[in-house]
Amino acid sequence: MALILIVEDNLANMKLATLLLVRAGHTVLTAADAETGLTLARANGPDLVLMDVQLPGMDGLAATVLLKGDPTTAAIPIIALTAMAMQADREKSRVAGCDAYITKPLRYKELYEVIDSLLAPGRAGAAPETPSPVVPPEAGEMPHFGAGEPGPAVDVRILEGLVGDDPVVIRELFGDFRTSAIAIAEELAAACENGEPARAGEQAHKLKSSARAVGALALGELCAAMETAGRSHSTHELATLLPLFEQELGAVNAFLDSLPPGHRLP
């Protein structure tokens, strides 16, 4: 099978992508930032790169431009990964040189189909674009925080639908998610308190897709709302949403602690 490089700074997203690729028989290299990704791509010549668009420091599109401009890596297919689903974002990835575009959270069928199309012998041009819903098909309608009867903080079936029901794998992915979520939440709160709406929005964006992937849908929706508020520089809206976000994150952590022994976190 193929050697695939994943460039992704979110631990939970990285682990999910790695698991899906290894299950499909691929060998995986990982990088948490664009600079490391460039080094690994040039040194190892992977068959394909999964490139997160929003990375710390150099972003994924800038890294793509460099890879496509280097004769030694120009032919490597690159799939842009992003939690943004706007047509303008697709166009930016195309202009940068990405061969395909997938929105997070990853859905294994779409991921496998796009990879297969890009690695097919004698392929011509970029992979056909596949419309990507923002949430996994198993998730159904997104909840509306603050309205109606509250549901469970996490729908475990969503993650099981992505990776199967192996309790060891589920526990590991939930653990990675919680580790990432705690760190991101601290950065997000600090940005809100320091009057840095753009930075707060960036942190919310980082957590949004992994929250949805593990089934923390209300938390994912709050992240989306905070991302929008950050992009519009609405410090008032961020101040309103922050306590709701912290409350929901607490509910998610409490839910994970309450899981049955097969899924319980260490």
Image (tube, rainbow, N blue to C red):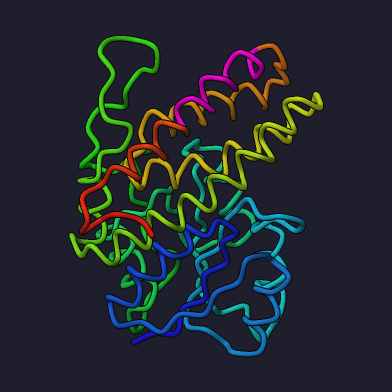
In this orientation, which residue lies closer to the viewer: 81 or 155?
155
Residue drawn at point x = 52 percent, y = 68 percent:
78
Q: Is residue 50 left or right of residue 167?
A: right
The answer to whether 240 is drawn above or below residue 132 in the figure is: above
Residue drawn at point x = 31 percent, y = 38 percent:
154
Q: Is residue 101 left or right of residue 75?
A: left
Locate the N terminus and report the quarter of the image it occupies. bottom left
The answer to whether 100 is drawn above or below residue 19 in the figure is: above
The answer to whether 7 is drawn above or below residue 96 in the figure is: below
The residue most toward the right is 194
Q: Which residues are magenta?
A: 237-249
Tally of marks: 0
Residue drawn at point x = 77 percent, y = 56 percent:
57
| Magenta-colored segment: predominant secondary structure | helix
Give the image location of residue 126, x and y in percent: 44, 64
Give the image location of residue 50, x and y in percent: 50, 66
Give the image location of residue 204, x and y in percent: 58, 36
Q: Is residue 107 left or right of residue 118?
A: left
Residue drawn at point x = 27 percent, y = 30 percent:
152
Give the image location of residue 62, x and y in percent: 71, 59
Q: On the image, which quarter does residue 131 sit in?
A: top left
